[in-house]
Image (cartoon, helix red, strand yellow):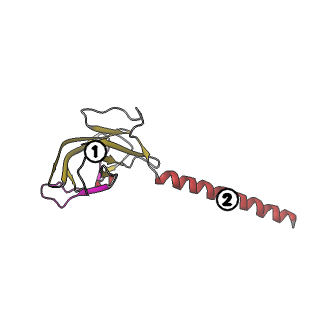
């Protein structure tokens, strides 16, 4: 009987360890690694303004604001392990830290959905629009490409 008690104790300790590791992994996955402000963690890209996340690049141009709509042109080039670009990977962050997803119901907006491409291929230029609650600067474009389990979020100040 004492041997069975020891076995149950070891089983309980092992299960507790697995649960703790699972909670730590969940917390780490729910908070993406931000590349903003981390120095030279990502290779440079050009021409500016642009972001490079592990070989997946995004260029931003023609940023305008009119009637509460922020418009910009974006182009992607994918030479990373990621397989796609998706409108849900982009958010506009207002000065109040409120985030807004892109809208595709505005005339002149490029309607696009998740697009598969890799091996250095390009996507775009795409016209993307956001309807933030406020256009008071600073406005930041947040990009969260799907580059792996513990990856990335990059911010680009656009206004």
> Which of 36/60 is in front?
36
> Which of 120/71 is in front?
71
Position of 139 compared to 15: left or right? left
**Residue drawn 25% across and 57% down?**
133
Q: Is residue 24 magenta?
A: no
Instruction: Estimate the x, y position of residue 156 in percent, counting from the top left.
Output: 30, 42
The crowd level at tag 1 (other Cα within 10 Å; few <14, some 14-19, many 20+) is few
Q: Which residue is mark 2?
A: 16
Task: Please identify the residue farthest to the bottom as the structure is shown.
Answer: 1
**Residue drawn 79% across and 62% down?**
7
Task: Please identify the residue farthest to the left as the structure is shown.
Answer: 107
Tell me the element at label 1: loop
- What's the CA distance linking mark 2 and mark 1? 45 Å
Q: Which mark is residue 138?
A: 1
Q: Does residue 110 appear in this view?
A: yes
| Count of numbered marks | 2
In magenta, the rendered stretch is: 99-118
Instruction: Estimate the x, y position of residue 138 in percent, counting from the top left.
Output: 28, 44
Q: Which mark is residue 51?
A: none
Q: Is residue 117 magenta?
A: yes
> Which corner quadrant of the image does residue 134 belong to?
bottom left
Tell me the element at label 2: helix
Instruction: Estimate the x, y position of residue 146 in percent, counting from the top left.
Output: 38, 49
Disc 2 versus disc 1: nearer the observer: 1
């Amino acid at each position: 009987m004492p041997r069975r008690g020891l076995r149950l104790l070891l089983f309980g300790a092992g299960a507790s360890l697995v649960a703790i590791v699972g909670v730590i992994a969940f917390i780490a996955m729910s908070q993406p690694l931000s590349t903003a402000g981390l120095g030279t963690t990502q290779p440079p890209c050009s021409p500016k303004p642009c972001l490079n996340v592990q070989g997946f690049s995004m260029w931003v141009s023609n940023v305008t604001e009119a009637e509460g709509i922020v418009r910009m042109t974006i182009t992607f080039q994918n030479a990373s392990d990621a397989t796609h670009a998706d409108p849900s990977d982009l958010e506009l962050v207002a000065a109040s830290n409120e985030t807004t997803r892109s809208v595709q119901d505005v005339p002149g907006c490029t309607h696009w959905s998740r697009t598969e491409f890799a091996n250095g291929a390009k996507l775009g230029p795409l016209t993307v629009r956001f309807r933030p609650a406020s256009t008071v600067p600073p406005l930041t474009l947040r990009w969260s490409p799907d580059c792996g389990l513990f990856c990335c979020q990059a911010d680009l100040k656009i206004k």
